[in-house]
Amino acid sequence: MKLLVKKQVSTFIFSFWLLFSLASSVPGLKNDEKVRGVNLGGWLVIEGWIKPSLFDGIPNGDMIDGTKVQLKSVNLQKYVSAENGGGSNVTVSRDVPSSWETFRLWRVSETEFQLRSTEGQFLTCEGQGCVVSATTEVPGTNEMFYIEKLSNSSRVHIRLDSGAYLQAMTENQLTADYPGTPDWDDNAATFEMTIVANNIHGDFQLANGYGHAKAKQVLEEHRNSFITIDDFYFISKHGINTVRIPVGWWIAFDPDPPAPFIGGTLAALDNAFSWAQTYNIKCIIDLHAAPGSQNGMEHSASRDGSIDWPTSQEYINKSLHVIDFLASRYATHPGLLGIELLNEPGAPDVPLDTLVSYYQQGYQIVRKYSQTVYVIICQRIGDADPLELYHADIGSTNLVVDLHYYNLFSDFFVNMSSAAEIDYIFKGREAQLQQLNAANGPLVFIGEWVNEWNVTSGSQQDYQKFGKAQLDVYNEASFGWAYWTLKNDRKHWDFEWNIRNQFLELSNSAGSQVFNAIMYLGLICSSLYLNNIL
């Protein structure tokens, strides 16, 4: 009888231990713990808002690639318009500007530009006396315009390479036939240029804005100083066991990637793996910027906000080539934990069937080199349900779905109180995590989150409570989480600043406290039970 009880108690203890160890286990990490990570954003893929000073030296920096402009004739007091958004002649006929009257700049030099309509066609003019239309799909010399600016003014002149200036004499056309060189008075060749948006500051804008030689110097200095081995020491000291490293597609073509991109990211990634190994940290490589852009944002290296990745098989094949390159180079490296196939594909611009097909092919590519490396697939941003990826047959082993949780970028959180935001973390986010954890499919990874919100007057204590709530909930993700990002010009986004200034307290999360308390209680109960019956 006593032997039977001993066996029952032993089974109870083992089952108790197994239950909780499996709930917090990611094989490949030390002690099979879950991912507690931080992103190295803004390092190998540039995001201007993370470090704005990188763009300070670009000449005529308010007219970089992707800048949206509107042009108003001072003679007619009408706006230049690409009728129907492009595909026909250009008029100067609108009193109030909207989408047809907005053009995206493609920068050729400090003063030379191509102008793209909302439907994607470029303004074109064949020479002296021509009528400007928005009918060209691929820009060339006929689509080149010199924009001359009056100092300290919004007034501009626009001329062709031949020297002919554009003018607006009638509402139904824009022509290249102004006689001579215009003054800056209210003549037909003078326009008021309004910069509507100048919010894309990525790798393309930096490299094309500076030019190759200067951009190479700027990026070399940035890559050598923004993230160093000292940062890996810092994060390891604070319990971080993983870094998620965003890379751009051009890394596969180092050291001489296609223009305007600048080589050197591959050497920097090699350094990261070496530093990570020094401090027993694992690496996730994340394809953050795909050719053609998968979401139109600066962190996808978009030139002008267009989302062309899903519309071109060439872009998809090139992305798969990048995954093959990364997997073949790092799959057997002891520091690699996972490869993320694509960051934040946009919905609905990226159709689900296109994305699933890409993920299936990417999964097989990684499996060609390793059966254990985690393959991470990111949910579509926008109006998309992450369960859609659980219903897709992408892969059978070591597959992870990446969710990005921000209490920002949505009207839903505007004017929400700190208490309401924290309550949403527990009621909304936790419920979704529990649903996904219970689903028969991939592990769950909160690959991006931040200790920032729309609460404008939050105290240090408010931030601590908000951070603690997120950690409590995100610790439940079956794969783990990664903070966005290690360093940032905006202090509450900066992981190091949050830790040093005690706005985020990693060791005090209720999830780990509850787990430890339950384990401790279980051991005590088991011990007492054994003592009473033996």
Image: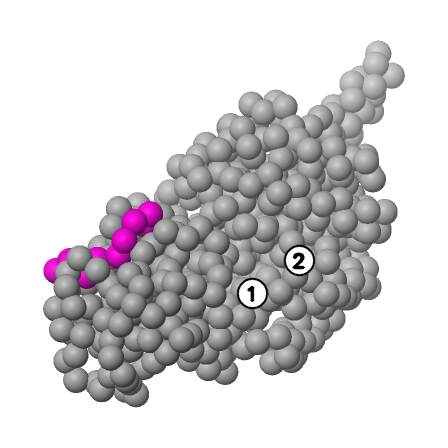
* Quadrant of the frame with the C terminus: top right
Disc 2 and disc 1 in contact, CB within 8 angstroms: yes
Location of residue 280 (image quadrant)? bottom right
Q: Earlier in the sequence, mark 2 or mark 1?
A: 1
Give me the residue at 30% from left, 49% from top. Answer: 88
Q: Position of residue 519 (x, y in %)?
A: 67, 38
Location of residue 123 (image quadrant)? bottom left
Question: Label 2 sits on what residue type?
Answer: Trp
Give me the residue at 75% from left, 37% from top. Answer: 365
Q: Which residue is mark 1?
A: 203
Asked if residue 93 is among those painted magenta in the image, a careful observer would answer yes
Give me the residue at 75% from left, 44% from top. Answer: 324
Give me the residue at 34% from left, 54% from top. Answer: 134
- Report whether residue 383 is seen: yes
At mark 1, the secondary structure is: helix
Q: Nearer the viewer, residue 269 or 406?
A: 269
Q: Position of residue 157 (x, y in %)?
A: 29, 77
Q: Which residue is mark 2?
A: 250
Q: Position of residue 348 (x, y in %)?
A: 42, 37
Disc 2/disc 1 C-alpha distance (Å): 10 Å
At mark 2, the secondary structure is: helix
Magenta range:
85-95
Q: Position of residue 498 (x, y in %)?
A: 52, 66
- Report whether residue 437 is seen: no
260 lies above or below 88: below
